[in-house]
Image: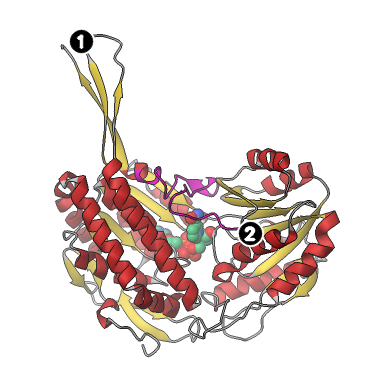
Amino acid sequence: MSRIQLKDGDLLRQQALFGGRWQDAHQGETLPVIDPATGETIATIPALGREETEQAIAHADAVRISWGKTPNAARAALLEKWHQLIIDNADDLAIIMTAEQGKPLAEAKGEVLYGASFVKWFAEEARRIYGDTIPSPSDDRRILVLKQPVGVAAAITPWNFPIAMITRKVAPALAAGCPIIVKPSELTPLSALALAVLAERAGFPSGVLQVVTGLPTEIGAALTESRTVRKISFTGSTRVGQLLMQQSADSIKRLSLELGGNAPLIVFDDADIDIAVAGVMVSKFRNAGQTCVCANRILVQRGIYERFSARLLEAVATLKVGDGFTPGSTIGPLINERAVEKVNSHIDDALSQGATLLTGGISQGNGTYVQPTVLGDVTNKMRIAHEETFGPVAPLFIFDDEEQAIAMANDTPYGLGAYFFTENIRRAWRVAESLEFGMVGFNTGAISLEVAPFGGVKLSGIGREGSRYGIDEYLEQKTFHIGSL
Ligand code: NAD
């Protein structure tokens, strides 16, 4: 615990919040939370299962009607308060996040502020849940569309953004009037529990936000099978997203799925090299390459390839691998050994099939630290072309013309983020319209903002988070016919 030095020690919780109070698992089982930088256990959390999840669902259901009827302005005011508390406690939240997730403290602080931005945004959107009036085909009738909360919602979230992936779901749910149960990743539950402490302090009624930590399979089964839970919002791997969709079939649940990606980043001959390199650095190496919108395939046009790769190597040389708590570290440890093995296997496979090692390489026995790596001459037959690497490895592919670049970029079952760099505006429109992805960045490697819709197509999922559309995921439309006027 010594690495977690907080101004407010009360934010570090080792119990879960459900059924109206902070509790242990009914049988007392726990799971360890490991600091990826040291491999040490920093806390334990309750290993909750089906029984406790059912208790949480029942409690959420008990407050469903009253929360749904709470005036929008009152819900907005509570969200505003929660937002302010997150900002006021940003330093402590960042420390908790770095300790359990590994990312550099400055990045963790950035995520806290980014996560808070969703709370602020949806506090504002809560006031703008408008319905429709529909012109009636006859004079004796009026037709309205009312927007109402879907009911009890659940969020299942990953470890790579332990706060932002939660607020992106919880804030619109609460704004819409839905109680929500959060099941955070068992690898990063402490950030979620700290958020729940602050939500309690903000004054949300009991049961409106609950956090269940523990056994994913059991909790997931209880949430998906329940007919009371009307909506699940999941962020994580495509494999688990598919499983949750199958399990939700019997209860016909609404689902938002933010799944894996295999983002292409295209650098055309006419790109501004400085802008393109900056785009790769932010998109590829943020969070040690552990983001769903990370550039996974860097497609470079032949004429600029040598100049671009030389400049990219200069930029990569400035990265500093180290403990997230050490000032100046820009690449923290990966989340666990399994992640390192996957990264190593991608590098190994690429090198064995003819890729060139430009910098970095397979890491050997340095905990879960991985050197930033750039591979040249990568081709489509290598695993790295088809699978998410989730690590700081930039594979460079060569293409000859625009048509080939678009075909290569779209040659994936995923469709989350894509990026391209060019100074030609006519090309920009053509390429943006041809890329089969939910989000496209033109001359930028950063595409995640609370004001803009975030989400994917194909195996990257369904639904959108953030923006004015994000709240629709938690609202039902009720058509209201008024007759005999
Ligand atoms: P994961 O799918 O292993 O886990 C995600 C969550 O699902 C965790 O809370 C986990 O405990 C839970 N889970 C696992 N098995 C479950 C089951 N059987 N039933 C219910 N819940 C279960 O993913 P991860 O390793 O935590 O995160 C990495 C993945 O998430 C990557 O593929 C990444 O691309 C994706 N991701 C996507 C987005 C996006 O917005 N599209 C954002 C971040 C991460």
- Check disc 1: other Cα within 10 Å, few if <14, some if 14-19, many if 20+: few
Residue 417 or residue 329, whichever sits in front: 329
Q: Residue at x 74, y 73 (%)?
A: 314
Residue 472 or residue 50, whichever sits in front: 472
Is 463 within the magenta? yes
Q: Which residues are magenta?
A: 445-471
Q: Residue at x 22, y 60 (%)?
A: 56
Residue 49 seen in render: no
- Check disc 2: other Cα within 10 Å, few if <14, some if 14-19, many if 20+: many
Up-down relation of residue 393 to residue 368 (above or below):
above
Q: Label 2: which residue? A: 295
The tag on residue 140 is 1
Residue 210 placement (x, y as % from top left) = 25, 62
The mark nearer the N terminus, 2 or 1, is 1
Q: Looking at the rendering, which quadrant does residue 133 occupy?
A: top left
Relative horizontal placement of residue 131, taking residue 32 as reference (left or right):
left
Looking at the picture, the colour scheme in use is: secondary structure
